[in-house]
Every structure is written in structure tokens, then in C-alpha cells.
Amino acid sequence: MAPIGNSQASQRTLRALAGSVFAAVLLAGIPARAQLPKDFVEKAFAPNATFAEATSITFADDGRIFVGERGGRIKLIQGDKAVQVCSTLTTIEREQGLLKILAHPNFAAKPWLYAYHMSKDYKRHYIVRFKFDANSAVTSLDTVVTLPDLENIGRHNGSGMAFGKDGFLYVGRGNDELGGGNNPAANWASVKGKILRFTEEGKPAPGNPHYATGANDGEKSIWARGFRNPWTLTADPISGRIFEGDVGDGTEELNELTAPDAGKDYWYGYGVGGGDGVGAAGGKAIDPIYFHGTGAKGECAIVGEVPYNSAAKSNWPAEYRNRLYVADYCGLSIRSVPLDKPAAPVNVQNDGNGTLEFYPNSKKKVGLTLGPDGNLYYVEYVNAGKIYQISYTGAAPVNTAPSLAPRTFSMRMGKAGTVEFAISAVTGLGAATDARLSIMEPNGKVRFQGNADVSGGSVLAQGFHPAAAGLHICLLTWSERGEARQAFGRLMVLP
């Protein structure tokens, strides 16, 4: 990794380093350009929380927010501060370290945090899983995936992680910067240069192309092939579409992986004459959906792509929805392009193709994500970086996420009673007939589950008999206009 700060490297050196995310350098003296569109603001989120080379931020569905630092520390936002809750043993040689963290999509019931990191002896990557209690203490740590040993100098190793709407864990593994006849990207016998798909326990996922016929678990776990350095993966929880950002040599790519053709490579599939961006391979390769040139405007690596579905709960105006927001590490830009896949790949540096220069001069970062409030978040990648929120302050219809506000704040262990919540930001709950409430003990065990009494803006759980002390997570689920909805609340049970 290059030192934090500006570099005086030449364009030639920049191109040589552009294949690396962490080793990429910023050009000195980038001129000031336009900022966010009208009525959009950027502000520090939890302003007293700082992070040393943060690589990832993840929002758990029970309200907890975790940030991973490259050196192995994992921190939790508490109020406007951050506290370390666990760590991994790793090394920060070259592009290595704690590269990604990811909360399980049903964290309230399965409080698991996945971490993708390099081993301390600089030999291989692991995906480990921390289990937390309600007080954010670690109760167990398991290794769920062991990836193959390094074959090269520790670059182009990937690290993308995302849970799909199908409940499977998608993982990006790079090609170890192996070229020519040694490039494994198009070879089904190697998991390198691939997108892998696992169960939440780290087993090959049913439905993978070679799940039933693969020679081993590695081949059985492959979902798609033909990648160089799949640094980012994102799943749209509404549409189920999967996107991947491939850090390139001459072109930075965005690919859609929702339903890949198992008979084709993506464009870094050197076995079919692919490589950067768009080329002519006689229909044997899968084009990226969007791309931009490496170095053309200072760019060097795609480090975030956020599908902003038009159905997302947010107050953002319509013209900023149904778009894919793309962040580059060196270029500092956040651009967006239409989320609907066009007939041909879109070069985001060309005019007239729907490209929106949303934020041309953001801070240096290696992550971009959508928060549960419908706003964009990223963590600045410096020695004392902060979380930044990009939100809309104009007069647009607000469609915020629902929440449960406790009217019953606490109960005594062993005594039965009625739990009551007020529910906010809901339009169709009053007519819902399928509302169900679950109350989970601090260890994740479901203690109460049944149809919820919903009337007059209140949610009642009658006859709840707590058997354990501590903070209980309450989950209300229902359907609203055919869409699955949920809201969370908390209840403290006293000894």
C-alpha cells in the first residue's frame, strides 16, 4: 500500500499502480470542481468516531453499525463515537489486511458478522464469522471459508462480499495478478478470478453451475468466471440484482452477475481474448454494463457501486432514483448511471448516455453503501477517517423506514405481561392481516412469536413471558401493497 497522502508519481507510475486499490496514488493538485447537486448535503455521521484506514462499513438490521479497519480492528458506532468490539489477526503487507466486513441480512435473528481477511503469515485469505450478543460482545468465532494460498505477490486478490436476496453469500476472489497462460480466470478448476457463491455456513450453494458435477468444493462453489480483481460486490435487496466492480488495468468495469451465462467469461476472461472493457470476442464473453477508463480523469479503481432502486424507502427525488452510484478511489468522484441495463455497455465518461456527475470531488474512500434510511454513506480512507452521510434536504415526499417506538420500556424476568409499541412511517399496516411479532432473547433465541394485535398505531404482544434478562430485539413483519415490510424495536428485560 502506498503511504496515505498525495503522491508526485508520474502518469507512467500511476498506470503501473492502477491495478491495485490500496497501492493507487492520488495526483497532487486536483482542481476544485462542482460539488453535490442542489439540496444534497454531506456531513460527518457520528462525528467523534474516527477510523484508521477503514475498508468497510456495514449496517445490521437491528440498528448496529460496524466499521472494519485494514489493521484488523472492527468497531461499533455507539452514539457519536466508535468502540472496538473485536479484531482479526492479519497483515497489512501490499494490498492485504482486513478487507471487508458484512452483517448477516437477518442480523436480529442471526447476529453474525462476516470478515474477509489475509492471514497474519501472509499465505491465504479467510472468511470468518463473529457471533455477537445483544451487548455486542463476541460469543463465538468460526472460519466459514478458507481460500487458496497466494501464488503471486499479494495483489489482485479481490474481497467483494454480498448477501443476495436468495440468502447466499457471494464472494469475489481475484486472479493473483497471474497473466498469460497462467491466468486462472477462465479455468473452472481454480476459484481464482471468480465470483463464488456459498451458503451462510460457507458451503457451495445449490444452483451453482457445477454444484452437482464439480470435482471438488472449490469448483462447486463457482458462480461466475473471468475476473481480475473483484474488489466490490453489491446485492439489491429489492430486485435481487447482483453487481460487481472489477479493478482494471486500462478500464474499470461494472458487471451484472444476477444470472451469468456459465458458458461465457466476463471481460477479464483472458481465455477468450478478453481483457479491459469492451472488445470483440465473437459472443464468447459477457460485456460489462458500465465502465470508465483507468487514469483518464485520475481514476484507478472502482471501490463501490450502489444500486438505488426506485422502490427504496427514501426522500430522494425521482430523478436520483433507479440509478447505479459508482465510486472511484483515485478520481474521488461519485457518478451515477441508469440502473436499467442498456442495450450496449455505457462508458460513464461519455456524454449523452445518462451519466450523472453526482459528486465530482468527494473524499478518498474505499467503500460506498446505502443506509437503511435511504442515504449514501462512505468511510474516508485516511489515518483518522470519518463516516460521511450524503442526504437530501429539499422538499420531496418523505417515505422513511418504519420503526417501533416502545411504550413498554422494560419488563421483569419471569413475569408475564403485554409489550406495546407505537409504529411510525407506515401507510398500509392498519389493513394488514399478516402482521407477526417476534421477540428474541439476547442469545438470538426466539422467545415469542405470533400474530400481532395492530390497531390505533399500536402493536401489542400479549402474554409475553420473558425467561432471560438483557436487551431483547423485537421484529414486526407484514405485507404492504404486496411488498414484504419489517420494523424493529428493543425491549429491556430486568433480572
Image (cartoon, rainbow, N blue to C red):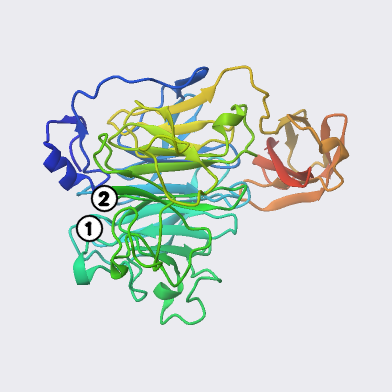
- Classify 419 as above or below 50: below
Question: Of callouts 2 and 1, which one flags the residue occurring earlier in the amino acid sequence?
Answer: 2
Q: Is residue 425 left or right of residue 185?
A: right
Q: Secondary structure at mark 1?
A: loop
Q: Position of residue 185 (x, y in %)?
A: 31, 66
Q: Disc 2 designates what residue?
A: 96
Q: Nearer the viewer, residue 419 or 466?
A: 419
Q: Are marks 2 and 1 in contact (CB under 8 Å)?
A: yes
| Residue 97 visible in the picture | no
What's under tag 2, amino acid-wise? Gln
Q: Quadrant of the N terminus?
A: top left
C-alpha span from label 2 to label 1: 8 Å
Q: Position of residue 180 (x, y in %)?
A: 20, 67
Quarter assignment of residue 360: top left
Q: Secondary structure at mark 2?
A: loop
Neighbour tally class for label 1: few under 14, some 14-19, many 20 plus, Cα within 10 Å: some
- Classify 148 as above or below 307: below
Neighbour tally class for label 2: few under 14, some 14-19, many 20 plus, Cα within 10 Å: many
Q: Position of residue 335 (x, y in %)?
A: 42, 34
Q: Disc 1 designates what residue?
A: 122
Q: Nearer the viewer, residue 200 or 40?
A: 40
What's under tag 1, amino acid-wise? Tyr
Q: Is residue 21 left or right of residue 432?
A: left
